[in-house]
Amino acid sequence: MGLPAMAANEGIQLCVFDTRRGHQEGQELDKILFFFPSDFPYSVQLSVVGLSEGIITFTRIFSPDAACEVIEEERHSHVFYQAEPDIWMVMIVEKNKDNESDWRCDALIDVLKEAHSLFTMFNDSLQALLDKQPSGELARSRLYTFINDYLSDFYVGKKIQVPSFRDCLKERRTVQMLTVSREVAIEVQGDTANMFTYAVLRLTPHALSSNTSSWSYLRRGVSGSSITASSGLLNSRSSPEEYHHGSHDSSMGEQSNRYHMPRPLQRDNWSKGKDGFLVCDIQLNVGGLVYLAPVVWLQQSEEHMYLCIYQHRSLTIIILIPVCSQTDGEQGIALVKKQLLENASEKIVHVEEKLSRGWGGENAYHVSGYRYLLVDTDKSISRTSPPGKVMTLAKDSLLTLNKLREEVDLEKTRANREKPDHEKNLEICIRAKNNSWIIAKITQGRELYMAIEKANETLLYASDAVEKFSDRYCDGAFSLD
């Protein structure tokens, strides 16, 4: 088993395909909704998708109720995510130890889950798009623009860098809580986590103002040139629609003329207006430039909402306005913005000042002597040591922690299959090669991962350190008593 020779030298392939399509001879390409890199020969794309679908079909013989998630081979890791009932996303990553490409497969699956969740939020489900346009042209067009924009954050130079062992103290698809005097999370739903992710990626003042050095919660230091290069993929590469319609002259730009193409993840698509509201998606109309508020789909309430963003200094406020309540479209949104400025400006200033006084800056999550990740899976919230502090950990500590998280992932999956409604409690302590202690604790829907680099210290010392951290920062959730 393995990839075709032409694909083996590439670092990553990512494909989206519909298992219901392409069963007729000569229509096999109709199965593919998205493929990256899109300039791969169609024969290679079909081989990758065919291999992936074969793996899914084969593994279902032994596990009909649980979808295939990971296949490891000598040169590649294959991760699978069943995004929708008949639609799969598959990422294939080349193994290369020289580049420190040691990753956790669950973290790669989380990348696929995040990409699909954000796509659905702005475009509706893939099934809904296929129902709207059965040829798949609409779905493909939106996938190609959106996922390529999403992947722009992963570029280092001209290559994509997937989350590696150095990201083992991060957790995707969670809301990171502020360290202010009193923390309150009334309710965090899937839509909230998606909105938080998008805000950090594109809407915070830091993300908006970084023209030459883009920033996301994934990593820092992406150069402006690499963003330009990655975004250029859309202009230099064509989509599968070309061969479905028998022409090699069509382009993504031409398809964009046929369908309005939302680009919420495109760099520099948002800018701040004089009234404090962010504007995006500029269109040329008869009367001049028109700023359109993006529409998002909330899965929890099954509603379409206008997305309006207001900023005052470091405070970003996301306002969701039901589309069904605004019969006047942009005029109605303008009225809502005006009422907000008239009635809530003073309160917004007060809240921003209070949060600024209570915010500890980039090192707000730092706890002296600890490098940690705290996750509340029930509430979808997390807290972690700041990236600058995590970088001080030795490579051996990070590698060991990454391996430990892999073991925890496997144990959680196994426990969920055997007893889906049973809450798993787990505690593991490992001594790394550099004498650091690597610790994982899971209890009552909370997870704690920790690295303590105190050479020659005992297990008793490490256990006592976890107890102190638990009592002070976790309400004693991980204490022995």
Image (cartoon, helix red, strand yellow):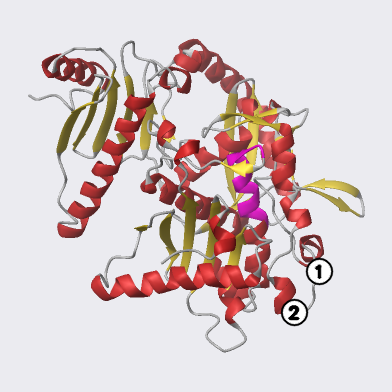
User: What's under tag 1, amino acid-wise?
Assistant: Ser
Q: Residue 189 sits in which quadrant?
A: top left
In the shown orientation, is residue 125 left or right of residue 416?
Answer: right
Badge 2 local density, few (<14 within 10 Å), some, or many (20+)?
A: few
Please name the residue shown 73% across and 43% down the image.
229
- Residue 186 visible in image: no
Residue at x-position 30% and y-position 38%: 403
Total labels drawn:
2
Q: Position of residue 470 (x, y in %)?
A: 21, 21
* CB-based contact (under 8 Å), mark 2 and mark 1: yes
Numbered disc 1: secondary structure: loop
Q: Which residue is mark 1?
A: 250
**190 up-or-down from 209: above or below:** below
What is the distance, in whole Å, between disc 2 and disc 1 at their CAs?
A: 9 Å
Residue type at the position of mark 2: His
Above or below residue 356? Residue 233 is below
Q: Earlier in the sequence, mark 2 or mark 1?
A: 2
Q: Which residue is mark 2?
A: 245
x, y (%) of residue 154? Answer: 58, 41
Which element is circle 2 on? loop
Magenta part mainly helix, strand or loop? Answer: helix
Q: Reply yes or no: does residue 150 show up in magenta.
A: yes
Q: Which corner quadrant of the image does residue 33 belong to?
A: bottom right
Tell me: residue 104, above or below residue 219.
below
Give the magenta range.
Answer: 145-157
